[in-house]
Amino acid sequence: MSKSKIKIKFLVVYLEKFKFSYSILHLYKNIFR
């Protein structure tokens, strides 16, 4: 049970990082258009 919880937490953190990097990438594209 705790293992799956850790997995879910890791997935959430990974998703947040992905969203963050994606938004930065989007910002760069807007700046250097």
Image (cartoon, rainbow, N blue to C red):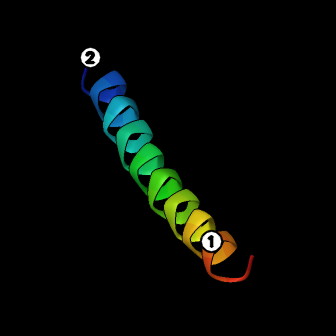
Residue annotated with mark 1: 30
Q: In this view, does 20 lie to the left or right of 6?
A: right
Residue annotated with mark 2: 1
Q: Quadrant of residue 26?
A: bottom right
Q: How crowded is mark 2: few (under 14 residues within 10 Å), some or many (20 or more)?
A: few
Q: Relative to 21, is 32 above or below?
A: below
SS at mark 1 in the image: helix
The structure residue drawn at horizontal position 53% and vertical position 70%, both measured from the top left corner, is 24
Q: For the view shown, which residue lies furthest in the bottom direction?
A: 32
The structure residue drawn at horizontal position 28% and vertical position 27%, both measured from the top left corner, is 5
Cβ atoms at labels 1 and 2 below 8 Å apart: no
Q: In which quarter of the image is residue 31?
A: bottom right
* Mark with earlier residue (1, 2): 2
The structure residue drawn at horizontal position 46% and vertical position 44%, both measured from the top left corner, is 15
Amino acid bearing label 2:
Met
The quarter of the picture where the N terminus appears is top left
Q: In this view, does 26 lie to the left or right of 16?
A: right
Residue 19 in the image: x percent, y percent? 47, 51
Task: Please state which of residues 13 and 22 is positioned toward the viewer in this rendering.
Answer: 22
Q: Relative to 26, is 31 above or below?
A: below
Task: Please state which of residues 26 and 10 is positioned toward the viewer in this rendering.
Answer: 26
Amino acid bearing label 1:
Asn
The structure residue drawn at horizontal position 39% and vertical position 50%, both measured from the top left corner, is 16
Q: Relative to 8, is 18 above or below?
A: below
